[in-house]
C-alpha cells in the first residue's frame, strides 16, 4: 500500500522525518484508517533522551511529519481527488505544539494517530496522539500550510 | 569553556539532541552570554526538509534541548550554586511550542538564544529564538520540569 509520502514528487522527498529518498532519515509513512491517519515507527537505540526513553526531539519530528503528511492527504480528500493527480500537495509546518504527557519508553513500536480538525484554503490543522500499546504518551497539534512557491524546486512547479 | 550539557552526569548524557556521549546525536552545547543562553549548530546536509532548507523536526529538537539545558542552568543560578555542585539538575520537557516564521536555509550556522521567563519550584519556562545571520526564522517555548526520579537511572540518584 502506498503511503501519503510516496506521492510526494521525488525532489520533495528528502525530508529528514519522512523523505523516502533520505537514507539517513526516519522515513515515516502515513496511511488512512477511515478518517484517522496512522503511522508507526520503532525508534533506534540512539534516538534516546534519558536511558530507556525516546528522544523528545525525535517525537516532535514524528508528530511534525505525520501532521504535514496528513494535511496533504486531507487536502486531496477535500478536493475529491486522488493523491496521484496533479498538482501535487505538499505542506510545511507553520506551528507545532507537543505535550509530553509521560515518558515514552524506548523499544516498542510507536503508533501516531492523526485527526484532521480543519481544512481551510491553504491551511490544515491536525491533532495527533502518540501511543505505546494502550498508553498515550504524547499529544500534539500541527498547523500546516501549503508549501509556498518560493520553497518549491523549479522542477516541481506545475507545468 | 564547559557547556551546560557538560555538567550532565555521564548516565544522563546520551540524549539524541544534546548528549555529549551520543555519537549519532547533535551534541548541542549551550552557554550563558549574560542573561541569555546561546547555542550554535550547523545542520548536516541530510538534516533537510525541502531542498535548501533545514528540517523542522531537527529545529524542534534543537529548541527542545536548548530549552532543557537552559532550564538546568537557570535552576542552579536561582539557587546561587555552581553547575559542578550536587545534586545535579536535569530537566525534561513537559510542553514544546515551535513557530516556524519563515524557512530556515540549510548551510549556515544557526544561533539559538534562550530567555528564561520563569523559575518556579521544579518548573522553568524558556523562550527561544533561532536565527540565521540577522534573520529570526523560528520562535519557540519550552516548559521544562525537573526530571522525575522514576526516569533517573539508579546511579544518578543522590547518595
Image (cartoon, coloured by chain):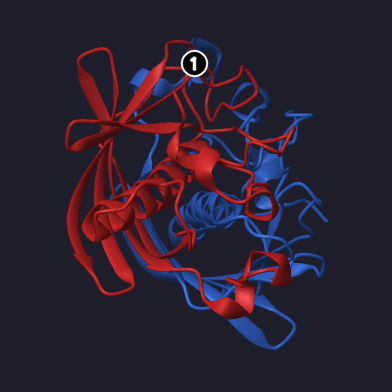
Chain colours: A red, B blue
Q: Is residue A39 visible?
A: yes
Q: Quadrant of residue A146?
A: bottom left
> Residue visible at 31% across and 53% down?
A81
Task: Classify B158 as above or below B88.
Answer: above
- Left/right placement of residue A150 relative to residue B2 reads left
Category of crowding for the residue at label 1, using alpha-carbon neighbours closer than 10 angstroms: few (below 14), some (14–19), many (at least 20): some
Question: Where in the figure is residue A19, as x and y percent of width and height?
Answer: 62, 42
Residue positioned 51% across, 60% down in the render: B77
**Is A18 displayed left or right of B152 in the figure?**
right
Q: Decide: is A41 above or below A73.
A: above
- Which residue is more in the foreground, A8 or B155? A8
Quarter occupied by residue A80: bottom left
Q: Point out the image quarter for the N terminus of chain B.
A: bottom right
Q: Is residue B34 visible?
A: no
Does residue A149 lie above or below B116 as drawn? Answer: below
Residue B37, image x, y percentages:
61, 68
Q: Which residue is mark 1?
A: A52
Give the x, y percent position of residue B7. 67, 41
Q: Residue B96: image x %, image y %? A: 38, 54
The extreme bottom residue here reads B134
Q: Is residue A9 left or right of residue B122?
A: right
Question: Label 1: chain?
Answer: A
Mark 1 element type: loop
Depth order, front residue of A114/B30? A114
For image coordinates 66% across by 44% down, the residue present is B5
Which residue is at the front of the view, B140 or A10? A10
Amino acid at each position: 500500500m502506498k503511503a501519503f509520502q510516496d506521492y510526494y514528487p521525488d525532489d520533495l522527498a528528502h525530508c529528514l522525518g519522512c523523505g523516502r529518498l533520505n537514507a539517513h532519515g526516519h522515513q515515516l509513512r502515513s496511511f488512512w484508517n477511515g478518517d484517522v491517519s496512522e503511522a508507526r515507527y520503532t525508534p533506534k537505540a540512539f534516538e534516546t533522551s534519558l536511558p530507556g526513553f525516546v528522544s523528545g526531539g525525535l517525537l516532535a519530528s514524528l508528530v511534525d511529519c505525520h501532521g504535514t503528511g496528513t494535511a496533504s492527504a486531507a487536502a486531496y480528500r477535500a478536493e475529491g481527488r486522488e493523491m496521484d493527480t496533479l498538482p501535487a500537495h505538499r505542506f510545511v509546518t507553520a506551528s507545532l505544539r507537543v505535550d509530553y504527557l509521560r515518558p515514552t519508553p524506548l523499544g516498542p513500536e510507536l503508533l501516531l494517530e492523526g485527526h484532521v480538525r480543519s481544512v481551510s484554503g491553504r491551511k490544515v490543522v491536525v491533532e495527533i496522539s502518540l501511543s505505546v500499546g494502550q498508553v498515550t504518551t504524547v499529544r500534539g497539534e500541527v498547523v500546516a500550510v501549503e508549501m509556498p512557491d518560493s520553497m518549491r524546486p523549479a522542477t516541481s512547479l506545475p507545468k
